[in-house]
Amino acid sequence: MSIVFRLVAGGIIAILGPSFFVVTIAGPLGSVAARLVLAGLLHKGVSVLLVAALPGMFYTALTAWPLTRLMDRVKKQIKGGTFFGESGI
């Protein structure tokens, strides 16, 4: 199911761009899609799987934007030639 999550969340960001709103909702929407596929494969109720995933979806929505910004800064540092070996860290 992780591939479903990655395809949906990554696809949303790839199509709509990495804005605050898109990054915040892409993870939970990917999780909902993965749970829908899982429910179909297991022939179980979707609501039970979604309720169990709510804490993780909430956490993902809260942390996705700050982590995106952090990774952006790291990427810029690496592209700028500041590697860990050169910086003395």
Image: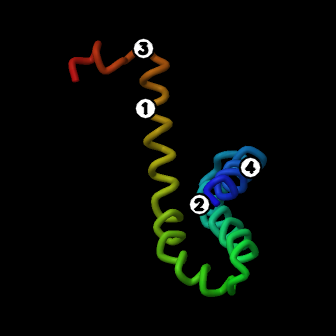
Q: Are marks 3 and 2 in contact (CB under 8 Å)?
A: no
Q: Quadrant of the N terminus?
A: bottom right
**Which residue is identified by label 3?**
81
Residue at image position (59%, 60%) is: 24
Residue type indicated by callout 4: Gly
- Identify whether 35 is placed above or below 68: below
Q: Earlier in the sequence, mark 3 or mark 2?
A: 2
The Cα atoms of the two marked residues, 4 and 3, are separated by 30 Å
Q: Is residue 89 left or right of residue 18?
A: left
Q: Earlier in the sequence, mark 4 or mark 2?
A: 4
- Identify whether 8 is placed above or below 72: below
Label 2 packing within 10 angstroms: few (<14), some (14-19), many (20+)? many
Q: Position of residue 71 (x, y in %)?
A: 47, 39
- Identify whether 80 is placed above or below 32: above
Secondary structure type for disc 4: helix
Q: Position of residue 82 (x, y in %)?
A: 37, 17
The image's mark for residue 11 is: 4
**Which residue is identified by label 1?**
74
The Cα atoms of the two marked residues, 3 and 1, are separated by 11 Å
Q: Earlier in the sequence, mark 4 or mark 3?
A: 4
Q: Position of residue 46 (x, y in %)?
A: 69, 82
The Cα atoms of the two marked residues, 4 and 2, are separated by 14 Å
The Cα atoms of the two marked residues, 3 and 2, are separated by 30 Å
Secondary structure type for disc 1: helix
Secondary structure type for disc 3: loop
Residue at the farthest front position: 42
Label 1 packing within 10 angstroms: few (<14), some (14-19), many (20+)? few
Residue at image position (69%, 57%) is: 4
Q: Are marks 4 and 2 in contact (CB under 8 Å)?
A: no
Q: Is residue 55 left or right of residue 82?
A: right
The image's mark for residue 24 is: 2
